[in-house]
Each structure stands twice: as structure tokens, then as C-alpha cells.
Amino acid sequence: MNGGASSASGSGYLSASKLALLVCVEQYSRHYDWGPATLSELGQFLVTSLYEATSWMDNGWHDLRDSFSKIHVHALDRSLLAIVCLRLADLHTIDALHVFFDDIARLVVDAEARIEPDGEAILLDSESVFGIFVRRCFLAFNQLEFYQISRFFAECQQMAGVLGGQQQVVEQTVHSQTEMQEHVEALICKLEEESRTPVPEKMQRMIRRSLERLPGYSRIHYLRYLDLVRRGESKQSEQSLRRFFDSNAIKDNRTIYQYALLYLAAMRVQLGMVDGARQALTEATHVARDCQDHLCLLYIVCWECRLLFDMLQTQKDGKTEVALRQSLGALVAKASSMHNYELEAAGRMLQTDLLVATNAQPTDVFESLVRVRALVVEHDVGRLRTAWYLTAARAWMKHEKS
């Protein structure tokens, strides 16, 4: 692969080469201290590249590397290539990519906006060449499907290797133990974000490869557990979960024990094992109270709400609905008081799902969605980004004729 015009991610617009240019736009915006000469040279290069995109995309990543190496940042006495490579090295996980796109989108403002610059940052006019480019890339990235993001990430890693002078391109294969562990964490992050979507075959191969290469790494059992839960394998997923906690446990460590019970309950909720989930949640509650672990108790309430919601889906019961509304209210209030914005957003998202399930007015449903979205964006709760889109999709499907 040489970074051609058709991205491996399947996106019609976004590509690894454009990520490299986005990094350049970011550096241009955030480094006023580089001086007018360097910024002028970098600006001219970017404008030319964006207007003549097909030429450098067809020539591939090697020509892009040559172009970067010709621009010297005098303030740092380094080439632009070295700076871009260092920035790309920071984007070593899929979650880091999400953060990058969110951050660069904040540099774009409307032409009439009266916003003070962020420190020394040069804000980008939304209708300028740079502003339009950033907005199009941000939109294209947010429209990528789960498997497309994985492909895009792999393509970006390959490009980073070429820009850094590595001639050997690999398909997300990492050789050192540290890199392999980072690779496992990236997979875990993605599986945690999208708990109800099927695992693509390519990702399953990555998981199997990780199991073979890191048999002694405890987190590999957690990755296996996430994979098996999504495939509905109750017995094997519980075995992997037990291996994960066994490999981390210290004898008589009740703190680990209470979270092991919490994860066991979560697994059973997701697999529809109502009685087993309730039993595990009850036991986890006793242990968490003994340890005075208020955070664990908050997570327990969250999963109890999820269990009540699933029960309400299968059989309409007024008592269950009342209990769910009360539990969700308590969850949101407690999470807010503890400044735990992830659990507050999760609780409010369940409240939105409840509104949809009980045929609430569309205005109430979408006002709730907007509040959740604001909470997720304001406090950068990236783990719930995908969950919000799924909730919004369910709401639109319910009220598309309203």
C-alpha cells in the first residue's frame, strides 16, 4: 500500500495522507511561536497540497515524506517531518484518534464568531481552505463504521512507518511486548465502546493472534471475555473473566472480589441471565458496602437499572417501570454529586431509552438526547460516543413518522 487515493478504511474522502496533512494544519494553528517565515512556508505548502490533492496522493507516502523533510522549523531547529512523525506516534490507539479529531475540530470557528484564541492558537475560519478541510475530515471520520475505523487506524500506522523511514509495512502486527500490550488495550477500548455489535472477522483474527503472543498478559483474558460476551458464549466468557481476576488477585483482596462480581453481573445482564445477574449484583453490593466503595456501588446501581430496563422490554409492568424511574433518578443524582460524568451520561441515556420504550412525546425524547449529547461532549466522555449514536438511532426509528 502506498497511500493512494482510495483509503483502506472505505471512506470516500478520508485517508492516512489526509491525517498527515491534518497534523500539519494542527501544528500550523497551535504554533504561532514558529514565526512568520516558517508559518508562511507551511501555509503555502498546505494550500498547494489541498488544492492539488490528487497529485500527492497518487505519488504516495514517500513523496509526502520528502515534502515534509524540505520544510525546516527554525524555532525548533527540526524538520517538519520529524515533528509530524512525533505527533503521529502519539496517535497509537484508536481512542487517541478520536481525541485528535475532536480537538482539531475545536480550532474551527464561524467567521462572525467573537471567540478569544485558545492560548496562542490560530483559530481557523470555517469557510477558509483549512477550515473546510478540517470540517470535511471530521465529518468523514465520524461517519466511519466500526470496521472502517479499524482499517483507517491500520492505514495510518502503516503511513507513520513509511514517514518514519520504515520500509517494511505490516498489517497492524507489532513485535515488541510493549507494543503488543498497547495493541490489546486499543482492541479493548473499541470492544467496550460498542458492546452490542458483532466482532468483524479481521478483529477476531487480531484477538487470536494477541492470545498466542501474550499468553501471560492478564488483560488478554479481559479482551477474550469481551469478545466472547458479544458472541453470546456465557460459559467461556465467564471462564475468561475468572482467569482475568485470578491473574490480578491477591489472597483475600475483597476490593478485587467486589469488582469481579460486578463484571460477572454485567456479563449476565448482557446475556439475559436475569437470576444469575441479580444474584451477583446482590453479593457485589454486600462486599462494596463492607469496603465503603461508593464508586462500585454506583456502578452496581447502573447495572441494576440496565437489568430493570431489559425486564421491562420483555414484559410491560407498571411496578417495574416505577422502580426503574426511581433507580435512574437516584443514579443520575448520585453520579452528578460525585462528578462522575460517564455514569451520569449512562443514566441519562437509559432515561432516554425509557422514554422511547414508553412512547413518550418526541419532543421529550429528543430534548433528553440533546442533554445527553451535551454532557458527553462537554466532559469528553468518549467511551459513550457510540452508545449515544445507537440510542439516537433507536429514537429516530421510533419517531420517524411523527
Image (cartoon, grey):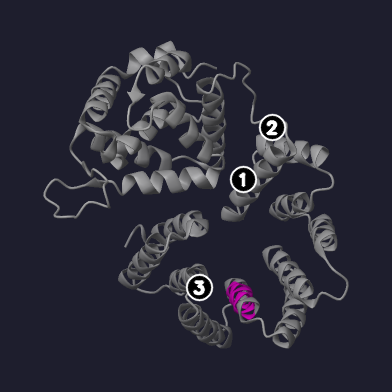
| Mark 1 Cα-neighbour bin, 10 Å: few <14, some 14–19, many ≥20 | some
Q: Indicate the amino acid at tag 1.
A: Ala
In percent of width and height, residue 160 lies at: 52, 27
- Please give left or right for residue 256 compared with residue 66 in the image: right
Query: Label 2: how many residues lie within 10 Å, few (<14), some (14-19) or many (20+)?
Result: some
328 on left or right of 197: left
| Residue neighbourhood size for the residue with mark 3, other residues' Cα within 10 Å, grouped as few (<14), some (14–19), many (≥20) | some
Of 355 and 386, nearer the camera is 386
Residue name at image x 14 percent, y 45 percent = 111
**Boundaries of the magenta span:** 297-309
Q: Which residue is mark 1?
A: 186
Amino acid at circle 2: Val
> Gap in Å between the C-alphas at discs 2 and 3?
35 Å
Q: Residue at x 43, y 44 (%)?
A: 100
Q: Is residue 259 left or right of residue 78?
A: right
User: What residue is at 69 percent from the left and 53 percent from the top?
Assistant: 230
Q: What quarter of the picture does the C terminus occupy?
A: bottom left
Q: Residue 70: within the magenta?
A: no
Q: Is residue 298 magenta?
A: yes
Give SS at disc 3: loop
Residue pointed to by mark 3? 340
Please name the amino acid that badge 3 sits on: Asn
- Pointer 1 or 2: first along the chain: 2
Q: Which residue is mark 2?
A: 174
